[in-house]
Image (tube, rainbow, N blue to C red):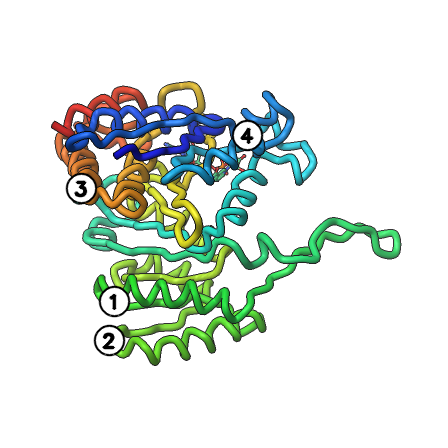
Amino acid sequence: MAYKIAVLPGDGVGREVIAEAVKVLKALKLKGSQEFIFTECLVGGAAIDEVGVPLPPETLETCLNSDAILFGAVGGPKWSNVAYHLRPEKALLDIRQTLGLYANLRPVKVYPALVDASPLKREIVEGVDILVVRELTGGIYFGNPRGIEKVDEEERGLNTLVYTASEIRRIVKLAFEIARNRRKILTSVDKANVLETMQLWRRIVTEVARDYPDVTVEHLYVDNCAMQLIRSPKQFDVIVTENMFGDILSDEAAMLTGSIGMLPSASIGGKVGFYEPIHGSAPDIAGKNKANPLAAIASAALMLRYSLNLESEATRIERAILTALEKGYRTPDIAQEGTRILGTQEMGDVIAENLA
Ligand code: NAD
């Protein structure tokens, strides 16, 4: 059995952390005749430099013909002034939309060894275990009309927040299914007090909830949720929300774990599962062997679990991460007194060794 994996490192630290995730996957000894076949593709700024567009057709083709996609990060100052349709980040939006990846799962788990790496107090973050379910193919990032136009001699920017009832229903149902297999608490985050789109969101959550009497549902406005995530994050089990709110809240939640470099993600629901760390290309530390590769390595574990059905291998990677942290190995972003600081590549080596 050969598992075909499209590898899209992208730009900046994306390249560095994906190299470590691939290193760890190669170090996994698969059973029998199972093997991974990796195909590396251009995406983002690297693709613009090479072929003039952020998402070359061959990259998309390889993604569509693979069993799963492992993605690093795209973007950087070099490409920040190019036209919107040629920006590196546009590649990511186009992949999500073309593949129909409507659900982004972001587990926010505080590792016991990292409790003191969080900027919040130990008693607030200890034991936090949240899953953010973010809608990924709708909302204001994709809505039309959009653009910058001139009206009566003045420029104005325009974006549209739009959701159909069926788009809301499918993400909400998925979140209920997930909550049912966890602690059975679902928090739906909206802004129904000011946005009609979010009134529809809330109404559909209430309707779908009737099919899940075993799950406790709570509705929170996004501003309150942002505050509650810092005040008492342990109240949350599964959070379901629309695209932009989910983008912002999951970066905030990342800090509960100590660093954005710790958070993996899985984008599912479409033709091929897509796995990436939630961070960007981190131009400030790119090329310095300083990036934390654990989010990328944990994303590879999610890939094994959700797309390749290799649960025990996924668990082995997650245990190897846990062991490295318990032994006191740290990248600079999660460094604490008395711990051993490693570079990106050395952390990858430690995880690969720990698999045994
Ligand atoms: P960023 O996530 O790249 O960096 C934010 C901060 O987190 C920086 O201080 C960075 O050093 C730190 N950081 C990020 N990843 C880290 C890691 N693995 N280990 C240690 N520290 C880490 O966000 P940004 O600075 O707002 O964006 C930089 C570029 O990345 C922009 O072009 C942006 O559009 C792009 N971006 C891409 C993605 C993606 O590809 N999925 C996501 C977010 C941002």
Marks 4 & 3, CB-CB < 8 Å contact: no
Q: How far apart are marks 2 and 4 (CA)?
A: 45 Å
Residue where numbered disc 2 is placed: 214
Mark 4 residue element: loop
Residue 193 horizontal side relative to residue 339, left or right: right
Q: In this view, does 25 lie to the left or right of 158?
A: left
- Could you tell me the amino acid type at mark 2? Asp
Q: Name the residue under label 3.
A: 315
- Contact (Cβ within 8 Å) of mark 2 with mark 3: no
Residue 151's x, y, as percent?
A: 84, 56
Q: Which of 177 and 331 is in front in this view?
A: 177
Q: Which residue ends up furthest to the right in the rendered image? A: 152
| Residue kind at label 4, given as amino acid type | Gly
* Pointer 4 residue: 76
Q: Are marks 2 and 4 in contact (CB under 8 Å)?
A: no
Q: Horizontal and vertical percent for residue 323?
A: 14, 34
Q: Residue at x 23, y 21 (%)?
A: 349
Contact, CB < 8 Å: mark 1 with mark 4?
no
- Disc 3, SS: helix
